[in-house]
Amino acid sequence: MRRAETFFIAIAIAFYVWFLTHYGPGQVLGYVRMAGWGLALTISLETIARIANTIGWRVTIEDYPPKLKFLELFAARIGGEAIDYVTPSAQLGGQFVMAVDVREKLRMPVGLATVVVASLAEAIGQIAFLTIALVISLRLIPVAANLYWAIVGGFTLAVALAGGFFFVQMKRPFSHLWRAATKLDIARINTDEIRESADEADAVLLDFYARHRRRFVASCICYAVAWSLGPLEICILLTLLHQPASLQIALLVEAVGLLIERATFLIPAKLVSQEGGKALILGMLGYPPGVGFVVGFLRRIKEMVWVLFGLVALMIHRMVVQQRGDTTNAAAAGRDSVIKMQRAQGEQSL
């Protein structure tokens, strides 16, 4: 696995070096200057997508704790997405971070189960968006073209991955993970409390799919709305670069880019799919060679801004938790001091 990741990272770096050497950094910087402050519009547009993603998670939580604010859920969501972006965790690391960040107000088993459900809803929302996008835009590519069948194959892979993920969820995954972890002989894991939490998370997971199908559909719709903002961003970026933009082209570019990301989901930071994917499809559609690369590069800038927001949210959360722990420890120490003083006074009186 690590060899494959290293191989793709090396290919991505080689692609960047080749592109900048062939076309020159001046051309890329010229396009970036052309976009200018318009990039702030795409960063702001991403706020709507992140809010829709958070709502998609929110609706999967049946007994939502009143003390858990939406802003806290939003911060946990963007923090988990930041972890997914910078690490090759296949989204598992980010999901765990989301559940951990809200565990003080949302019990850990419920948090783990709901983020897993929301992850599947996100995948199905993406498939719904891809279906609509490809039906509208795939006519731009001839059936005889190799890329046409690659797109069809990528879509089939996305559906298969979502189906496999659902199948795994039906097989009590948390209990299996706990049993696998106990074989590592880690004392903190091999406890009755952890085992009971894993069993409860599996129970919540199975109960959700049995009784809350409407909630699941609502979550899928939220994520589909978030995915549908991608083509709008492509149109904005092409317009900023003074290039012709149409709905069909934006849908095709976004759909192909998502399929490439699905195929390379283990590679951190979308190193293969972002600039390379946009350069490939826009080049095939007749755009100047540098435009596709710059569209991907501008989108990476937007994503890195949101990664920064997510990491800052995680840092603030840890600082608050640490400060709260220090306050609790200080209060406990104060109570112990008072008790000791009272005991000492009692002994003196005797």
Image: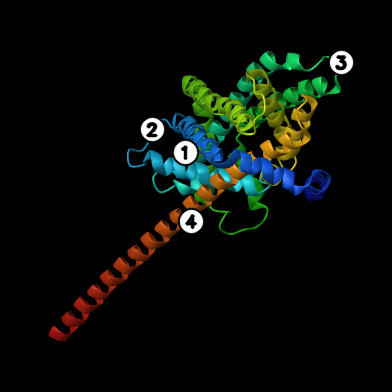
Q: Indicate which disc residue 315 carries.
A: 4
Label 2 close to label 4 by CB (< 8 Å): no
Q: CA distance from mark 2 to mark 3?
A: 52 Å
- Label whose residue precedes the other's in the sequence (2 or 3): 2
| Mark 1 lies on residue | 110
Q: CA distance from mark 4 to mark 1?
A: 23 Å
Q: Quadrant of residue 35?
A: top right
Residue kind at label 4, given as amino acid type: Met
Secondary structure category for the residue under label 4: helix
Q: How many callouts does the rendering have?
A: 4
Residue kind at label 1, given as amino acid type: Val
Residue 105 placement (x, y as % from top left)? 39, 45
Give left or right: position of 189 versus 153.
left
Foreground: 236 or 80? 236
Residue kind at label 3, given as amino acid type: Ala
Residue 218 placement (x, y as % from top left)? 48, 22
- Check the image and name the residue furthest to the left: 349
Residue 9 placement (x, y as % from top left)? 77, 48
Label 1 close to label 2 by CB (< 8 Å): yes
- Label whose residue precedes the other's in the sequence (4 or 1): 1
Q: Residues within 10 Å of mark 1 (few under 14, many from 20)?
A: many
- Label whose residue precedes the other's in the sequence (1 or 3): 1
Q: Indicate which disc residue 63 carries.
A: 2
Q: CA distance from mark 1 to mark 3?
A: 49 Å
Residue 51 placement (x, y as % from top left)? 46, 34
Q: Indicate which disc residue 144 carries.
A: 3
Say above or below: 218 vs 101: above
